[in-house]
Amino acid sequence: MSPLVFGLLAAAALMHATWNVLLKTAGDPLRTSARAMLAGAGVAVPAAFAGWLAIGRPALPPEALGLAFASGLVETVYFVLLSAAYRRGDLSLVYPIARGSAPLLAVLSGTLILGERITLLGATGVAFLLAGILCVQRPWTLLFGSVRRPAPGRQRDAVLLALATGAAIATYSSIDRVGTRLVAPWLYEALLWVVGAAGLVAWIAAADRLRSRVAAVPGDLPDELPAPPDAAARAAGWGRSIAVGVLLLATYFLVLVALTLAPLTAVAPLRESAIVIGSGWGALRLGEAAGRREAAWRLAGAALIVAGALLLGLAG
């Protein structure tokens, strides 16, 4: 892998971890995600349109449009699942499981559904991923009633939502790998960004209509559908949302460019180095770990997940 690709992915990993910290610590992760996507679209669409005019207004392949639309829809699902997971679990729990399960699910689908054969190096990577996820989740602590960890039901839900988020990541990564080969990455990104932003706005609007129909109080609603914020909270949240949107846009663009320069099997694992950054921030700076021992478990699990992803990339 060239130093350019490595540098792009290192920068993308740092920015990815940063916007996840901002999203986790937001009062309403889902609405923050929607505003961030809108802010990103406000930057990406005019820039992409100007670029499209500058290069002579080339025709866009229908296949690229279809893939961008599909990826945008999967992005909507991704943010809904991720926001729900963050409302239930710690950053240092949800983030590594969501990111680490994506390459694991890709390997499992390839071997179990497509009949692909896995090498010894790949099998070692799978073992590292599984060990890392277990170290992060530490399911055995439920048997001993750790007082610091979330309630068992909420922790189980957070893990399941994180795994579903990983499936969404694996899905849109595969779609984007094809889409970026059919059209310029910056143009493809703008197209899917519009779809993703519209999807999140539509989801929240539908949730608000449902809320008004059943006349439920916030406590009666699922965690991923909190009550709409008041005017003051909405205005205060836009600053964080714009920061998340800019980081999202920059991260996604760097990854899409990397996908045009290197195979997915190399790009996907290296971008997961953000797992260690995000897990360390959650465990140490956000106080999610009950002491140094639990922080060490979570950091060790995150490191194992990154090692497993790297081994899978080498095996691929």
Image (cartoon, rainbow, N blue to C red):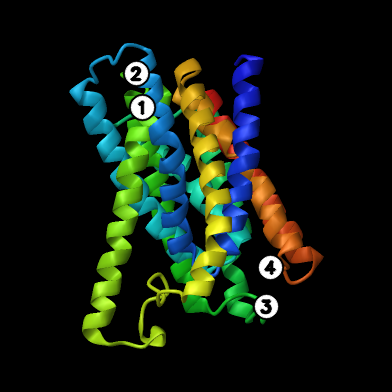
Vertical comparison of 8 with 54: above or below: below
- Residue pointed to by mark 3: 148
Q: Is residue 176 visible?
A: yes
- Residue found 43% across the figure and 63% down from its top: 31
**What is the C-alpha distance between the residues marked 4 and 2?**
49 Å
Q: Amino acid at mark 2?
A: Leu
Residue under numbered circle 4: 288
- Say which quarter of the image contains residue 311: top right
Locate residue 118: give its quadrant: top left
Q: Are dots 4 and 3 in contact, CB under 8 Å?
A: no
- Residue 53 disc label: 2
Q: Residue flagged by tag 4: what amino acid is it? A: Glu
Tell me the CA gap for discs 1 and 2: 6 Å
Camera sees residue 174? no
> In front: mark 4 or mark 2?
2
Q: Residues within 10 Å of mark 3 (few under 14, many from 20)?
A: few
- Vertical position of residue 277 compared to residue 173: above or below: below
Q: Quadrant of the N terminus?
A: top right
Give the mark nearer the N terminus: 1 vs 4. Answer: 1
Q: Secondary structure at mark 2?
A: helix
Q: Which mark is residue 49?
A: 1
Q: Mark 2 against mark 3, which lies toward the viewer?
A: 2
The residue located at (43%, 65%) in the rendering is 84
Q: Residues within 10 Å of mark 2 (few under 14, many from 20)?
A: few
